[in-house]
Image: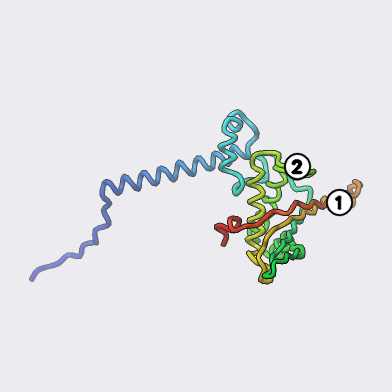
Protein backbone atom coordinates (compact mmCIF):
# COMPACT_ATOMS: atom_id res chain seq x y z
CA UNK A 1 0.00 0.00 0.00
CA UNK A 2 1.44 3.33 -1.02
CA UNK A 3 1.24 6.17 1.45
CA UNK A 4 0.47 9.64 0.15
CA UNK A 5 1.45 12.89 1.79
CA UNK A 6 -0.63 16.04 1.37
CA UNK A 7 1.54 18.81 0.09
CA UNK A 8 0.53 22.47 -0.12
CA UNK A 9 0.01 23.72 -3.64
CA UNK A 10 2.96 25.59 -4.94
CA UNK A 11 2.42 29.37 -5.14
CA UNK A 12 2.70 31.31 -8.36
CA UNK A 13 6.27 31.80 -9.39
CA UNK A 14 6.86 34.97 -11.39
CA UNK A 15 9.42 34.80 -14.11
CA UNK A 16 12.39 37.16 -14.01
CA UNK A 17 11.04 39.38 -16.84
CA UNK A 18 7.66 39.62 -15.08
CA UNK A 19 9.34 40.60 -11.82
CA UNK A 20 11.32 43.28 -13.62
CA UNK A 21 8.16 44.70 -15.21
CA UNK A 22 6.28 44.71 -11.90
CA UNK A 23 9.19 46.34 -10.16
CA UNK A 24 9.45 49.00 -12.88
CA UNK A 25 5.71 49.76 -12.70
CA UNK A 26 5.86 50.02 -8.91
CA UNK A 27 8.83 52.39 -9.13
CA UNK A 28 7.04 54.59 -11.68
CA UNK A 29 3.94 54.77 -9.48
CA UNK A 30 5.98 55.68 -6.40
CA UNK A 31 7.96 58.35 -8.26
CA UNK A 32 4.85 59.75 -9.94
CA UNK A 33 2.97 59.95 -6.64
CA UNK A 34 5.93 61.63 -5.00
CA UNK A 35 6.22 64.24 -7.77
CA UNK A 36 2.49 64.97 -7.62
CA UNK A 37 2.53 65.45 -3.84
CA UNK A 38 5.62 67.63 -4.15
CA UNK A 39 3.90 69.81 -6.77
CA UNK A 40 0.80 70.24 -4.59
CA UNK A 41 3.02 71.11 -1.62
CA UNK A 42 4.88 73.76 -3.65
CA UNK A 43 1.51 75.14 -4.76
CA UNK A 44 0.22 75.68 -1.20
CA UNK A 45 3.53 76.47 0.49
CA UNK A 46 4.77 80.07 0.96
CA UNK A 47 6.64 81.41 -2.05
CA UNK A 48 10.24 80.23 -2.24
CA UNK A 49 13.01 79.92 -4.81
CA UNK A 50 11.97 76.39 -5.80
CA UNK A 51 8.28 77.22 -6.28
CA UNK A 52 9.17 80.32 -8.32
CA UNK A 53 11.59 78.38 -10.52
CA UNK A 54 9.05 75.65 -11.35
CA UNK A 55 5.88 77.78 -11.18
CA UNK A 56 4.79 77.01 -14.77
CA UNK A 57 5.23 73.25 -14.31
CA UNK A 58 3.42 73.27 -10.96
CA UNK A 59 0.53 75.37 -12.30
CA UNK A 60 0.21 73.11 -15.32
CA UNK A 61 -0.25 70.10 -13.06
CA UNK A 62 -2.44 71.65 -10.37
CA UNK A 63 -4.85 73.83 -12.38
CA UNK A 64 -7.76 73.52 -12.64
CA UNK A 65 -8.72 70.14 -11.17
CA UNK A 66 -6.36 70.05 -8.16
CA UNK A 67 -6.26 73.69 -7.10
CA UNK A 68 -6.29 74.25 -3.33
CA UNK A 69 -8.21 77.17 -1.81
CA UNK A 70 -5.86 77.64 1.13
CA UNK A 71 -2.26 78.43 1.91
CA UNK A 72 -0.01 76.52 4.26
CA UNK A 73 0.19 78.22 7.67
CA UNK A 74 -2.23 81.01 6.55
CA UNK A 75 -5.84 79.90 5.92
CA UNK A 76 -7.94 82.47 4.08
CA UNK A 77 -11.63 82.01 4.92
CA UNK A 78 -14.25 83.10 2.41
CA UNK A 79 -15.68 86.56 2.97
CA UNK A 80 -18.37 86.44 0.28
CA UNK A 81 -21.06 84.03 -0.77
CA UNK A 82 -21.24 83.90 -4.55
CA UNK A 83 -24.32 82.50 -6.24
CA UNK A 84 -23.89 81.47 -9.87
CA UNK A 85 -26.80 81.28 -12.31
CA UNK A 86 -26.87 80.36 -16.00
CA UNK A 87 -29.34 80.77 -18.82
CA UNK A 88 -29.26 79.57 -22.41
CA UNK A 89 -30.58 80.45 -25.83
CA UNK A 90 -32.14 77.62 -27.78
CA UNK A 91 -33.08 77.07 -31.41
CA UNK A 92 -36.54 75.85 -32.41
CA UNK A 93 -37.28 73.74 -35.51
CA UNK A 94 -38.66 76.80 -37.34
CA UNK A 95 -35.36 78.65 -36.94
CA UNK A 96 -36.42 81.01 -34.16
CA UNK A 97 -34.40 81.39 -30.98
CA UNK A 98 -35.59 81.59 -27.41
CA UNK A 99 -33.88 82.95 -24.29
CA UNK A 100 -34.63 80.67 -21.36
CA UNK A 101 -35.03 81.60 -17.69
CA UNK A 102 -32.10 81.66 -15.31
CA UNK A 103 -31.12 78.36 -13.71
CA UNK A 104 -29.68 78.57 -10.19
CA UNK A 105 -26.59 76.37 -10.40
CA UNK A 106 -25.35 77.29 -6.93
CA UNK A 107 -28.86 76.93 -5.53
CA UNK A 108 -28.94 73.34 -6.76
CA UNK A 109 -25.65 72.60 -5.00
CA UNK A 110 -26.85 74.21 -1.77
CA UNK A 111 -30.06 72.16 -1.89
CA UNK A 112 -27.98 68.97 -2.27
CA UNK A 113 -25.76 69.93 0.69
CA UNK A 114 -28.41 71.11 3.14
CA UNK A 115 -29.41 68.33 5.52
CA UNK A 116 -26.82 65.93 4.08
CA UNK A 117 -24.46 64.63 6.81
CA UNK A 118 -21.83 63.70 4.23
CA UNK A 119 -22.18 66.13 1.30
CA UNK A 120 -20.30 65.53 -1.92
CA UNK A 121 -17.08 67.42 -2.53
CA UNK A 122 -18.41 68.16 -6.02
CA UNK A 123 -21.55 69.80 -4.62
CA UNK A 124 -19.49 71.84 -2.17
CA UNK A 125 -16.58 73.03 -4.26
CA UNK A 126 -16.62 72.24 -7.99
CA UNK A 127 -18.75 75.15 -9.18
CA UNK A 128 -17.38 77.59 -6.60
CA UNK A 129 -13.78 76.88 -7.49
CA UNK A 130 -14.58 77.06 -11.21
CA UNK A 131 -15.93 80.57 -10.67
CA UNK A 132 -12.89 81.54 -8.57
CA UNK A 133 -10.69 80.25 -11.39
CA UNK A 134 -12.57 82.39 -13.92
CA UNK A 135 -12.68 85.45 -11.65
CA UNK A 136 -8.93 85.26 -11.07
CA UNK A 137 -8.16 85.27 -14.78
CA UNK A 138 -10.58 87.98 -16.05
CA UNK A 139 -11.02 91.71 -15.59
CA UNK A 140 -14.47 92.30 -14.03
CA UNK A 141 -14.80 95.61 -15.87
CA UNK A 142 -14.78 94.20 -19.41
CA UNK A 143 -14.27 90.42 -18.91
CA UNK A 144 -10.94 90.65 -20.69
CA UNK A 145 -8.23 88.07 -20.00
CA UNK A 146 -5.65 88.88 -17.34
CA UNK A 147 -3.47 85.78 -17.72
CA UNK A 148 -2.85 82.86 -20.03
CA UNK A 149 -5.25 80.54 -18.18
CA UNK A 150 -8.29 82.68 -19.00
CA UNK A 151 -9.53 80.62 -21.95
CA UNK A 152 -9.13 77.42 -19.98
CA UNK A 153 -11.19 78.96 -17.16
CA UNK A 154 -13.97 79.86 -19.61
CA UNK A 155 -14.08 76.34 -21.06
CA UNK A 156 -14.02 74.79 -17.58
CA UNK A 157 -16.93 76.91 -16.33
CA UNK A 158 -18.96 76.40 -19.48
CA UNK A 159 -18.54 72.62 -19.53
CA UNK A 160 -19.57 72.30 -15.85
CA UNK A 161 -22.79 74.20 -16.56
CA UNK A 162 -23.56 72.32 -19.78
CA UNK A 163 -23.03 68.99 -18.04
CA UNK A 164 -25.79 69.98 -15.62
CA UNK A 165 -28.16 71.57 -18.12
CA UNK A 166 -27.72 69.10 -20.99
CA UNK A 167 -27.77 69.51 -24.77
CA UNK A 168 -31.41 70.56 -25.07
CA UNK A 169 -34.07 72.47 -23.16
CA UNK A 170 -37.68 71.48 -23.84
CA UNK A 171 -36.53 69.67 -26.98
CA UNK A 172 -34.66 72.67 -28.39
CA UNK A 173 -30.90 72.66 -29.04
CA UNK A 174 -28.74 75.00 -26.96
CA UNK A 175 -26.97 77.69 -29.00
CA UNK A 176 -25.46 79.99 -26.37
CA UNK A 177 -24.97 80.24 -22.62
CA UNK A 178 -24.64 83.20 -20.25
CA UNK A 179 -23.61 83.36 -16.59
CA UNK A 180 -24.62 85.69 -13.77
CA UNK A 181 -22.74 85.88 -10.47
CA UNK A 182 -24.23 87.51 -7.39
CA UNK A 183 -21.72 88.25 -4.62
CA UNK A 184 -23.10 88.77 -1.11
CA UNK A 185 -20.66 89.86 1.60
CA UNK A 186 -20.87 87.75 4.77
CA UNK A 187 -22.35 90.08 7.43
CA UNK A 188 -20.43 90.71 10.67
CA UNK A 189 -21.89 89.48 13.97
CA UNK A 190 -24.39 91.85 15.56
CA UNK A 191 -22.17 92.44 18.61
CA UNK A 192 -19.14 93.53 16.57
CA UNK A 193 -20.37 97.06 15.94
CA UNK A 194 -19.08 96.91 12.36
CA UNK A 195 -20.90 98.62 9.53
CA UNK A 196 -23.47 96.68 7.55
CA UNK A 197 -22.08 94.96 4.44
CA UNK A 198 -22.53 96.61 1.04
CA UNK A 199 -25.37 95.66 -1.27
CA UNK A 200 -24.94 92.47 -3.32
CA UNK A 201 -22.96 92.89 -6.51
CA UNK A 202 -24.33 91.34 -9.70
CA UNK A 203 -21.99 90.52 -12.58
CA UNK A 204 -23.27 89.27 -15.93
CA UNK A 205 -20.91 87.67 -18.41
CA UNK A 206 -21.28 87.91 -22.18
CA UNK A 207 -23.03 85.20 -24.16
CA UNK A 208 -20.75 82.33 -25.14
CA UNK A 209 -21.47 80.09 -28.15
CA UNK A 210 -22.06 76.39 -27.54
CA UNK A 211 -21.07 73.63 -29.98
CA UNK A 212 -20.54 69.87 -29.94
CA UNK A 213 -16.93 70.24 -28.82
CA UNK A 214 -18.13 71.71 -25.50
CA UNK A 215 -19.85 68.39 -24.72
CA UNK A 216 -16.92 66.16 -25.63
CA UNK A 217 -16.23 63.71 -22.81
CA UNK A 218 -19.18 64.82 -20.68
CA UNK A 219 -21.26 62.04 -19.20
Residue drawn at x 78%, y 44% as measured from the top left: 142
Q: For the view shown, which residue lies furthest in the front direction?
A: 94
* Residue 206 vertical placement versus 49 (above, below): below
- Disc on res. 139: 2
**In terms of depth relative to the viewer, which is nearer, 96 or 119?**
96
Q: Secondary structure at mark 2?
A: loop
In the visual, does 154 lie left or right of 32?
A: right
Residue drawn at x 26%, y 53% as measured from the top left: 13
Q: For the view shown, which residue lies furthest in the left direction?
A: 1
Q: Nearer the viewer, mark 1 or mark 2?
A: 2
Residue of label 1: 189
In the visual, does 168 lie left or right of 198?
A: left
Please state, as top left, top right, bottom left or bottom right, where the C terminus lies in the image: bottom right
- Disc on res. 91: none
Residue drawn at x 63%, y 51% as measured from the top left: 156
User: Mark 1 or 2 closer to N-term?
Assistant: 2
Q: Secondary structure at mark 1?
A: loop
Amino acid sequence: MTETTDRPAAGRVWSTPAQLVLGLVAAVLVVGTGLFLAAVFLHVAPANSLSRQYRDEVDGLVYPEFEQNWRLFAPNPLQQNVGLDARVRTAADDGTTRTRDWTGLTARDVAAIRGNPAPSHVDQNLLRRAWDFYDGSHNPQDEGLTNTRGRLAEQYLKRIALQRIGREVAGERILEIEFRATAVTVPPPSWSGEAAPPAPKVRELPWWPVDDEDYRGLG
